[in-house]
Image: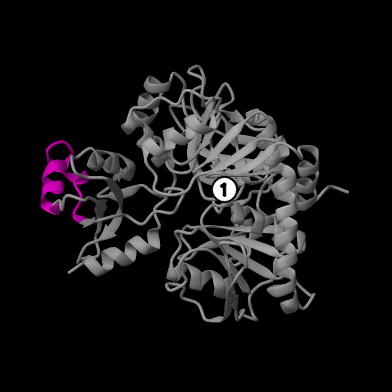
Amino acid sequence: MALTVWQHFVEACGLHSDRPAVSSGDQVLTYLDLLNAVNDLAETLSGNFVIDDADGAQPVKIAIYAENSIDYILTYYAALKLGLLPFLIDRAFGKNELESISASCGIELFAMSGDQKAFALSVKSAASVPNYSLSILKIEPVQTAPQPCSDTVTCRFTSGTTGSPKCLEFSQKAVVNAAQNWVKGSGLCSEDNILCVATFANGLAFNTSLLATFLAGAHLHLFSGPLSSGRIVSVLQKRGITRLVGFPFLYKLLTEGKKSISTVRHAVSAGAQLGEDIKNNFFRQNGFSISDYFGIAEVGPCTWNSGMPESPGLGKALPGVELAVDGSSAHPAEILVKTASMATRYLNYPGLLESKINAEGFYQTGDIGYLSDNVLFVTGRLGRGIEISGRKIDPVEIENFVRSMPGVQDAHAYAGKDMNEETVIEVSVSSTNSIDPSDIRHFCRQALPSFKVPSLIFVFNELPRSSSGKIRQDELMRMTASAKP
């Protein structure tokens, strides 16, 4: 019988017992220390917070809503040891997302860090866990919430067109396969020092760091505090980091800081689009490219790019991954993916994930691109195009142009409606310089054809993005609705 995620973790801790496993600041735990700490926390949770609530029919659902920390890792593995079902929730989620998740998934416990004042749910009780930076909140679960599949071991969330976060169920086999195939395909080894800047709730960190690190016997370093190029580079140099894991914003900071990262062998990125200017500037500064890989929340990591100059695109398929793309560079087509780490279903949207999987078992990604010598190139996405008067407009083109305007920090373009219910281009931007929308429109008119000039422009201090860098569309729509006259 195949080992569970918990059994793989215990086996790895025994195999690498004296090696450093995880660090945060000056705190370092060896693999043996890590296993002992997990066991201690599991005993504390069992005796004081969890088991007395379990009825034995279904696993207790515990949501982990916290920043990356050693305590986060301990909580995740302690939950697995106790037979609980952990739900990993992005710390960027707010009131609306938490209410939706709790109601649609039937969450019973929240393990959370930080301020509880903004917590929107009806809490039965709350208590701090002695000697840990976590509190356990007991929630009145929704009795009609759907029950997870019997082999589900972890749930994570992804946004989309449903109006609320979709809960992805992952089996023991899927979680283990994702980690094992990442170790094998990316060459992760016991000599690696990994700095993870992405949140564990997101697939980038979850699949590349939370179990894969331990299977390889590597050393995982956690980053906390304000994100700046100076602080990142200082940690890289001090810890001898060989593998950096983060989203495009991290690499934007590093290229703006213009400091080389001499110890790093692989700079791993995924999620939001990585701009060509960031890629080029990073290569000029460091002499190697960012390993920008293709992965999707529903299916896990799909490709690996070694980061060498001769490695274009998003790399070749990882072990356990099949890519099917019936297109070419001249005529890109939808990318279909089948992996050994695919989610089972959406817990709170039954049938939706299944509807995206074809008869051959391939997930229809909605991304378009092509394969060249088995290397994947992604050129766009289905469904984001805006059509006005028969003209098809790529919103990414408009976003990139608006971002080039001095004073604009971020931009997101999308289709909207004017007072006559006609389709128009809307753009939301973030700026700290109090830019006037009319100035942005004038800037666009200088270079864009008239049909690509945004009709409605909203300026905010910051655009709502998830920790992976993706726009939180529902939150943005609420912001623009409030800003409209």
Give the color scheme: rainbow, by chain, secondary structure or one colour.
Answer: one colour
| Image location (x, y in percent) of residue 145 | 63, 75
Please say whether residue 321 is visible from this viewpoint: no
Residue 481 belongs to the span the image colors magenta: no
| Image location (x, y in percent) of residue 417 | 26, 61
The residue carrying mark 1 is 203
The residue closer to the viewer here, 369 or 118, is 118
Residue 438 belongs to the span the image colors magenta: yes
| Image location (x, y in percent) of residue 227 | 39, 44
Tag 1's secondary structure?
Answer: helix
Residue lying furthest right: 1
Label 1 is placed on what type of residue?
Gly
- Splitting the image into 4 quarters, where does residue 371 fall? top right
325 in relation to 28, above or below: above
Q: Which residues are magenta?
A: 436-457
Residue visible at 21% across and 62% down? 418
Residue visible at 16% across and 36% down? 447
Count residues near mark 1 (Cα–Cα under 10 Å), then give few for <14, some for 14-19, many for 20+: many
The residue closer to the viewer here, 210 or 136, is 136
The residue closer to the viewer here, 24 or 470, is 24
- Splitting the image into 4 quarters, where does residue 426 fall? bottom left
Please say whether residue 7 is visible from this viewpoint: yes
The quarter of the picture where the C terminus appears is bottom left
Q: Is residue 271 left or right of residue 360?
A: left
Q: Is residue 446 left or right of residue 221?
A: left
Q: Is residue 315 left or right of residue 54?
A: left
The residue closer to the viewer here, 9 or 239, is 239
Residue visible at 60% across and 35% down? 324
| Image location (x, y in percent) of residue 369 | 48, 34
In the rendered picture of this protein, how many numbered marks are placed on residues?
1
